[in-house]
Amino acid sequence: MKRLNIDLTRSLDCIDCILFLSITFLVTLAVLAGVILVPQNAYSHASPTSYFPQANSVLEQDGTLPDKVVIAYTERPEPKASYIRVTNSDNERVDKNDYGISANNTRESSVSLDSSKLKPGVYTVSWLALSKDDGHITRGSYVFTVSAGSNTTESVMAANNFTNSAIVDNINITSKISPFYSGINNNFTVSLSDSNGNAPNNIMTIFLILSNREAGLGPISTELNKVAEGKYSGSGAYLSQPREWEAKITAQRTDAYDLNHSFKFDIQSPP
C-alpha cells in the first residue's frame, strides 16, 4: 500500500508537470501571436504615397496649371468621410468641392481646381482619409506655389527673422525662420549643440512639423537637410497663412530617445 501511494504521488506530480508545461506553452504562443499581430494593425493606415502637384513644387502661372489635385494612398479612402481641400493665402477655397475616387485606382482620390482662382501665391492642400481597410483616420497638409516668375520681394525682406531656443536633454536647440513672412518661401534652420558648444554626433534626422489650428492647416511635415555638423536647414512656403502657427522639432538619435521641442509664433503677411 505504501508503494502504491508513492507511485500515485509520482503520477500526480507528472500530470501536474505536463499540465504546467502545456499551459506555459499555450501562454507563450498567445504572447508571441500578440507580438506578431499588434504591429500589423498599428501600422496599417491610409498614408499618402504620391501628390500631384508635388509637395513644395513651384508652378509657373504662364505655364500649364493643373486642373485637379490628386493624392494616392497606401489604402482605400472612404469617399463619404474623406476629403481634399485647396485654399489660397487668404484661406479661400479654390477647389470645386467634387472630391472623388479614381475610377481605375481605388487608392487614389482627387478634387478639381477652379483655374480662374489660381493666381500667383501659395496654395495649401489639406487632406483627410478614412481607410476602408482598417477604419483609421489620417490627415495632413502640404503646399505648392503658383509663381509669377519674380523673387525680388523675398530678397528685399531678407533682414527680418524669427529665433527660438530651448534646452532639451542637455542639448541646446535653436530654430530660425527667415524672412519670416507668410505666403512666401521661408528658410528654416535648426542648430544643435551640447553644454560645451559641440555638435552632437548621434543625430540621424531632423523633422519640422507645422500646424495652423485656426486655419485648419497641418500637420505639414518636412525633413531638414544637414548642411554642417549640428546644423540643418530647408526651405518652403509652408507658412501659407498669417497669424499663429505651432512648430515641433523632432531630432531622431541613434542611441537615445528623440529630442522633441514645440513652440508657437505669430507670423504676418508681407508688408
Image: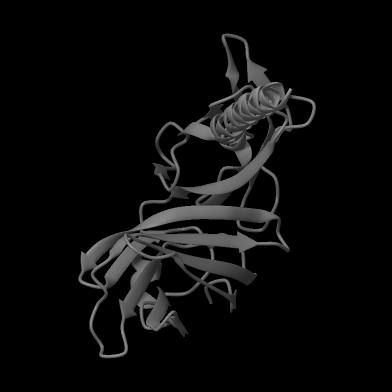
- Count of numbered marks: 0
Give the position of the N terminus as an image quadrant. top right
Q: Quadrant of residue 78?
A: top right
| Image side of residue 83 versus residue 197, left or right | right
- Viewer-proximal residue among 10 and 40: 10
Query: Going 55% across and 61% down the picture, which residue do you hit?
Result: 210
Q: Position of residue 112 (x, y in %)?
A: 63, 28
Vertical placement of residue 57 versus 211, above or below: above
Query: Going 50% across and 31% down the picture, which residue do you hit?
Result: 66
Viewer can see residue 127: no
- Viewer-proximal residue among 33 and 126: 33
Query: Going 60% across and 46% down the picture, which residue do you hit?
Result: 140
Q: Please, which residue is most extreme toward the front here?
A: 1
Q: Please, which residue is most extreme toward the left here?
A: 228
Q: Please, which residue is most extreme toward the right here?
A: 80
Vertical placement of residue 27 versus 194, above or below: above
| Image side of residue 66 versus residue 96, left or right | left
Q: Position of residue 60 (x, y in %)?
A: 40, 43
Viewer can see residue 184: yes
Q: Position of residue 226 (x, y in %)?
A: 25, 62
| Image side of residue 56 versus residue 125, left or right | left
- Viewer-proximal residue among 268 and 189: 189
| Image side of residue 240 versus residue 230, left or right | right
Q: Quadrant of residue 10?
A: top right
Q: Please, which residue is most extreme toward the top here?
A: 104
Asked which colour scheme the image uses, the reply is one colour
Q: Quadrant of residue 15?
A: top right
